[in-house]
Amino acid sequence: MNNDAHGDVSKRRTVLLVDDEKMVLEVGKAILQRLGHHVITALSGEKAVEEFARHGEAIGCVVLDLTMPVMDGKATFNRLRELRPEIPVIIASGLAVDQVISQFGDTPPSSVIQKPYQIADLSEKIESILSDRP
């Protein structure tokens, strides 16, 4: 395997996990690491944008909590898509999927996952998104 191919795989395996609840972040990070992903965490929308700007193209997808104080998931989503329009984003929410999608209008997230999420669901959504990317 050449270095370029290996580099592409590692980039696709980096997930930015964003949630304002520390326990959710810790459990989510452990799950994602067990599934073989490198995980960058952020406790706020502002921190997520900061981490995203810092790590740029290394991030393969984002798992983003919808309900957060100050900069909520929708505002964070919009900012991330301004920085990189093609970045896949999975919105995590306790709301019904159609309620979440309706909040995003013409630029829906790549996927929505119900909170609390199950390992199998999270794995399936991330694998589906990452396998679709070039």
Image (cartoon, grey):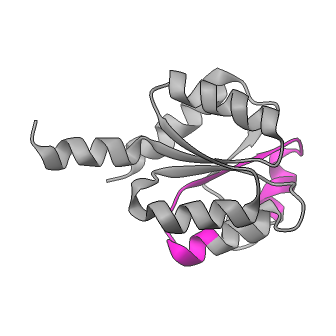
Magenta-drawn segment: 80-102
Residue with the most extreme left position: 2
Position in image of residue 13 (x %, y %): 42, 40
Total marks shown come to 0
The answer to whether residue 85 is magenta is: yes
x, y percent for residue 110: 60, 54
Q: Position of residue 37 (x, y in %)?
A: 47, 34
User: Is 77 inside the magenta-drawn segment?
Assistant: no
Of residues 42 and 65, the one nearer the viewer is: 42
Q: Which corner quadrant holds the N terminus?
A: top left
The answer to whether 93 is drawn above or below residue 48 in the figure is: above
- Report whether 63 appears left or right of 22: left
Residue 16, relative to residue 124: is it above or below?
Answer: below
Q: Residue at x 27, y 48 (%)?
A: 8
Indicate the quadrant where residue 81 lies: bottom right
Instruction: Please state which of residues 79 and 50 is positioned toward the viewer in this rendering.
Output: 50
Q: Residue at x 82, y 52 (%)?
A: 98
Picture quarter containing residue 118? top right
> Picture quarter containing residue 25?
top right
**Side of 128 relative to 49 (left or right):** left
Left or right relative to 81: residue 45: right
Residue 48 visible to the viewer: yes
* Residue at 53% in and 39% down: 126
Q: Position of residue 16 (x, y in %)?
A: 57, 49
